[in-house]
Amino acid sequence: MTTSTHTNLKTELTFPGVLPGNNGSKGLLRMHWAARNKLRDQFTWLVRSLTKNKHAGKVKLQLIRYHAGISMDYDNLVSTGKLIVDSIVLANVIIDDKESIIAQRDYRQVKVKTKGEQKTVIIIEDLSCGT
């Protein structure tokens, strides 16, 4: 779902399932670099299929992880966004992932009852020049 209000663009991207964090046997730290790059490339194509939006300046990025299992600690939750944010940059939805472009970040977890409800939602919103 993608919406635009006035001059502030808003992009919402939904990824099915939960994204890998750093820890665990399938975590980013243990994943071979080629497998990690392949996963990033798959995410890039998914992003390109979900939106044609292009945010030209500063943005706010929200990552909401809907999960049925145990909650991650905060630093592991933040790491789940690494490949997705890289994919969003590669798909040219935002121009870079540096702090001067993603000026605000918000990472949250929401507990759901079943694995079928698991998903990760990324919301990107333009920030006004004064923000």
Image (cartoon, rainbow, N blue to C red):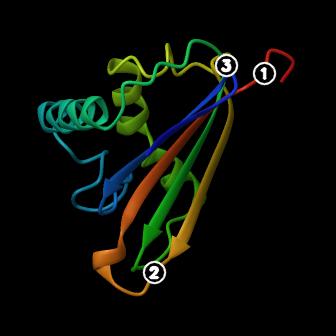
Dot 1 or dot 3, earlier in sequence: 3
Please tell me which residue lies in front, 3 or 105.
3
Amino acid at pointer 3: Lys
Compared across the picture, whether 40 is left or right of 91 comes to left
Do the numbered discs 1 and 3 sit on residues whose CB atoms are within 8 Å? no
SS at mark 1 in the image: loop
Do the numbered discs 1 and 2 sit on residues whose CB atoms are within 8 Å? no
* Horizontal and vertical percent position of residue 57: 63, 13
Q: Taking 90 as reference, is 26 above or below it?
A: below
Please tell me which residue lies in front, 117 or 28.
117
Residue sticking out furthest to the front: 6
Amino acid at pointer 2: Val
**Among the 4 quarters of the image, the one containing residue 112:** bottom left
SS at mark 3 in the image: loop
**Among the 4 quarters of the image, the one containing residue 87:** top left
Q: Nearer the viewer, mark 1 or mark 3?
A: 1
SS at mark 2 in the image: loop
Other residues around mark 2 within 10 Å, as few (<14) / some (14–19) / many (≥20): some
Compared across the picture, whether 41 is left or right of 123 comes to left
Residue sticking out furthest to the bottom: 113
Q: Residue at x 42, y 49 (%)?
A: 80
Does any portion of residue 11 appear in the rendered image? no
Q: Residue at x 12, y 31 (%)?
A: 34
The numbered disc on residue 128 is 1
The residue carrying mark 2 is 112
Spatial distance from mark 1 to mark 2, Cα to Cα? Answer: 34 Å
The residue carrying mark 3 is 58
Q: Residue at x 34, y 85 (%)?
A: 114
Other residues around mark 1 within 10 Å, as few (<14) / some (14–19) / many (≥20): few
Dot 3 or dot 2, earlier in sequence: 3
Spatial distance from mark 1 to mark 3, Cα to Cα? Answer: 8 Å
